[in-house]
Image (cartoon, grey):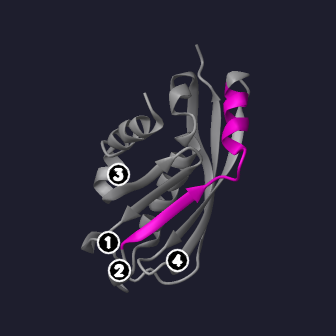
Amino acid sequence: MGSATMGDLVMAGFQKLGFIQYAGIEGVEFDAGRNVVSIAPRPEHLNHNGDLHAAVLFGLAETAAMGAAVSGIVDLMGATFIVARDGRIEYLARAKGAAGPFLATSEFPAGTVERLRADIAGRVAVELEVPVEIADGSGKPIAAATFTAVIRPRRA
């Protein structure tokens, strides 16, 4: 099975998750070490100022981060337990609802996926710092976030 086919299967599974459907998050790009997701604001996503609500931005960022965390290890998911330990976000500009859709991009430095795969093969628990950038429809930076993904061997 080629990587494009694996990516398609992962994206299809991603779209079935309850939070993803509830929030209206769409997968844009999924490749080893990189995940991009988007959201087109709906009225229920907006705050009293007409901006994308901070909680929606946080959820979008977390979705991008955890997708990136698993992007290079999809074939090893049965042997691992993955969860977000923490997350922090800095809101850089107003996320005006009319400026959407918003893109959240999470990407690792070169070599991260290979090290992660080696640690999983060695049954070593990993805490992986995962960066995310969110931009509006014009490419203007809206937020920057970092999450910690905990990846450890699944218990027997």
Measure how far apart labels 1 and 2 are at the Cα level: 6 Å
**Residue at left 44%, top 81%?**
138
**Residue at which label 3 appears:** 20
Magenta-drawn stretch contains 134: no
Query: Mark 2: which secondary structure?
Result: helix
Instruction: Estimate the x, y position of residue 10 in percent, counting from the top left.
Output: 40, 39
- Residues at marks 1 and 2 touching, judged by CB atoms closer than 8 Å: yes
Q: Judge the density around disc 2: few (<14), some (14-19), many (≥20) Cα neighbours within 10 Å.
A: many
Measure how far apart labels 3 and 4 are at the Cα level: 20 Å
What amino acid is found at the position of numbered circle 3 in the picture? Ile
Q: Of all residues shown, which one is farthest toward the left?
A: 43
Measure how far apart labels 2 and 4 are at the Cα level: 12 Å
Instruction: Estimate the x, y position of residue 51 in percent, counting from the top left.
Output: 39, 81
**Residue at which label 2 appears:** 97
Q: Is residue 8 left or right of residue 147?
A: left
What amino acid is found at the position of numbered circle 2 in the picture? Gly
**Residue at which label 1 appears:** 41
What amino acid is found at the position of numbered circle 1 in the picture? Pro
Mark positioned earlier in the residue sequence (3 or 2): 3
- Residues in magenta, as a range: 101-120
What amino acid is found at the position of numbered circle 4 in the picture? Ile
Mark positioned earlier in the residue sequence (2 or 4): 2
Mark positioned earlier in the residue sequence (4 or 1): 1
Q: Is residue 42 positioned above or below 60 on the image? A: below
Q: Is residue 110 left or right of residue 89?
A: right
- Residues at marks 3 and 1 touching, judged by CB atoms closer than 8 Å: no
Query: Mark 3: which secondary structure?
Result: helix
**Residue at which label 4 appears:** 142
